[in-house]
Image (cartoon, rainbow, N blue to C red):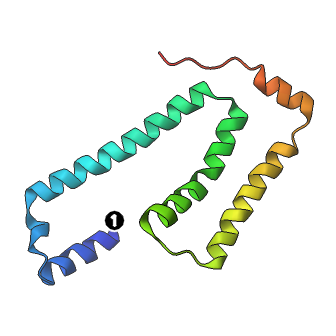
Amino acid sequence: MNVRVIVIPLSIAHRHENLLEPTLWIYAALIAGVSCALSYTLELVAMARVSPRVFGVLMILEPAIATLFGHFLRGEALYPEQWGGIATTMIASLGSIASVPLSAREGLNAMPQATIV
């Protein structure tokens, strides 16, 4: 919140008068609301339809997948340290799956699934 208080007046002062248009603010608010609501709704649907183990892995891999989309679709360059962070996250998630005993895995798959009303 504090950053916006500083950045918006500076942007207007540097001849970005279009920031004063009310339609821009309305569109920005709509896009922000829809994007948050859509992603939250999709996560709730996925949580109800997949096993807890799979959902946990998907949540762990979410930042890595977003980074890869940014790299390949938008051409964002990543530093070697960032690639290392992605690899570390993926290895950790695979390790968490592999470390669960087989009997526990079967128990997770047998759990009743939640239904969406």
Q: Residue at x 65, y 37 (%)?
A: 55
The x and y percentages for residue 84 are 70, 71
Residue 18 occupies quadrant: bottom left
Q: Residue at x 33, y 70 (%)?
A: 2
Q: Is residue 59 left or right of residue 89?
A: left
Q: Hey, which residue is sitting farthest bottom in the picture?
A: 14
- Asked which secondary structure carries label 1, the reply is loop
Q: Residue at x 67, y 41 (%)?
A: 56
Closest to the observer, 114 or 66: 66
Q: Residue at x 20, y 81 (%)?
A: 10
- Does 24 appear above or below 108? below
Q: Residues within 10 Å of mark 1 (few under 14, many from 20)?
A: few
The x and y percentages for residue 72 are 50, 63
Residue 54 occupies quadrant: top right
The x and y percentages for residue 45 are 51, 29
Q: Is residue 3 left or right of residue 67?
A: left
Q: Which amino acid type is shown beneath numbered disc 1?
A: Met
Q: Is residue 111 left or right of residue 40?
A: right
Closest to the observer, 79 or 74: 74
The x and y percentages for residue 63 are 57, 56
Question: Which quarter shows the N terminus?
Answer: bottom left
Q: Is residue 63 left or right of residue 100?
A: left
Closest to the observer, 1 or 97: 97
Q: How many marks?
A: 1
Residue that numbered label 1 is attached to: 1
